[in-house]
Amino acid sequence: MGAGCKEAAAEVGIVLPTKDEPRWIQDETRFNDALVAAGYDFEILFSEGSSAKEKENVEALITKGIKVLIICAQDSAGAAAAAEAARDAGVKVICHDRLITDTDAVDYYATFDSISVGALQGGYLVDKATDTGNPLYLYAGAASDNNAFLFFEGAWNVLQPKIADGTFVIKNSSEAVALQDKATLTRDEMGTIIGQITTNWDFDDAKSLAEANLTVASAADKGDVFILAPNDGTARAIADAFAADSDVTSYVVTGQDVEIASVQYIIDGKQSMSVFKDVRLLVTDSIAAAVTYLEGGTPEATNTYNNGVIDVPAKPSVVVTVDKSNVQEALIDSGYYKASVFTGLD
Ligand code: BGC
């Protein structure tokens, strides 16, 4: 139960996917901060990585009388039933960060610009690469998460021309190699590649996959390598695996979420970059949409995202590259983190 909640009085219910992926602890913390400060009644439940638990949580919140549901899906399609249960009970459904697909029972999507997240990751690798023939290792998020497709799409848009011109050579995905001449991929094509390079957003899966890729790669496929890692948790796992391989001379590896552990890795030179998605903005957007619905209005939208059934109104927030050169300015000076959380900051 979130601080500030009065039992059975919450008008806004918040459902987050899991505490095992550090990103969602950021969202919980920022929701607590914002809603306590604003004096709203609310309740936050976690789905423990299970769509069944997620649906139970939504049903429990409906029973308690919520009017608006803010939900970050464990599984984009798997959450459709929970969204429909809410819709049937007259509850407005706001997708938070992850779009719920395959249903018309969603009202709004509070999100970052996820295509840009992938484009910043891909663009960082491009900026660091010189000459031709640079080994490229690709990794993706969970295929059950619609965002994994958006991130990959954004990265592919930027990387593909540099694969086509020989700057990069894909080393760990025969499916990506088979499609490397295509500037734009269909969702099914992306699904084929993601199926081969998925981390399932899981550190252990990411580590095992990276180790398996390094085992089959020859020394000539290593050297100075470039790694598209989809988020910070998987980036650290993959970076550790590459750092442990004596045939890897140097690596550039991407991430996202500015998790504290990854910011420390960036300061220490063990992760190259992260994408800063200011969760304070996202939480503000979700709450603003919820309040607008409670007051009978329609939240502001600048875009739509198709979820397979309908175009869902959204107002995507901007994202920013963070590396060693701007950690202080982007994350400390902005008040996102306290400098004392880190060691070795100049
Ligand atoms: C989020 C990322 C997060 C990932 C794994 C995605 O849907 O947008 O910020 O790293 O899930 O939790």
Image: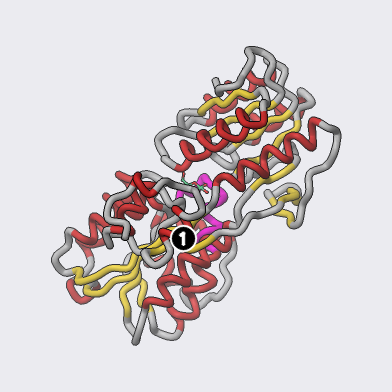
Q: Using the rendered view, name the quadrant where residue 327 is placed.
A: bottom left
230 vs 227, left or right, is right
Where residue 170 sits: x, y (%)? 36, 72
Residue in the picture at 73% in, 40% down: 289
Q: Judge the density around disc 1: few (<14), some (14-19), many (≥20) Cα neighbours within 10 Å.
A: few
Residue in the picture at 34% in, 87% down: 131
Type of secondary structure dominating the magenta stretch: helix
Judged from this view, the residue extending furthest toward the left is 246
Q: Is mark 1 within 8 Å of ligand 1?
A: no
Residue in the picture at 65% in, 36% down: 80
Region rendered in magenta: 141-153
User: Quarter of the image containing the C terminus?
Assistant: bottom left
User: Quarter of the image containing the N terminus?
Assistant: top right
Where residue 277 sits: x, y (%)? 53, 53
Residue in the picture at 67% in, 26% down: 39
48 vs 99, left or right, is left
Three-letter amino acid code of the residue under disc 1: Glu
Judged from this view, the residue extending furthest toward the top is 7
Q: Nearer the viewer, residue 215 or 2?
A: 2
Task: Check the image and tell me how it is coloured.
Answer: secondary structure
Q: Nearer the viewer, residue 248 or 209?
A: 248
Where residue 340 sits: x, y (%)? 34, 45
Where residue 215 sits: x, y (%)? 20, 60
Q: Is residue 343 magenta?
A: no
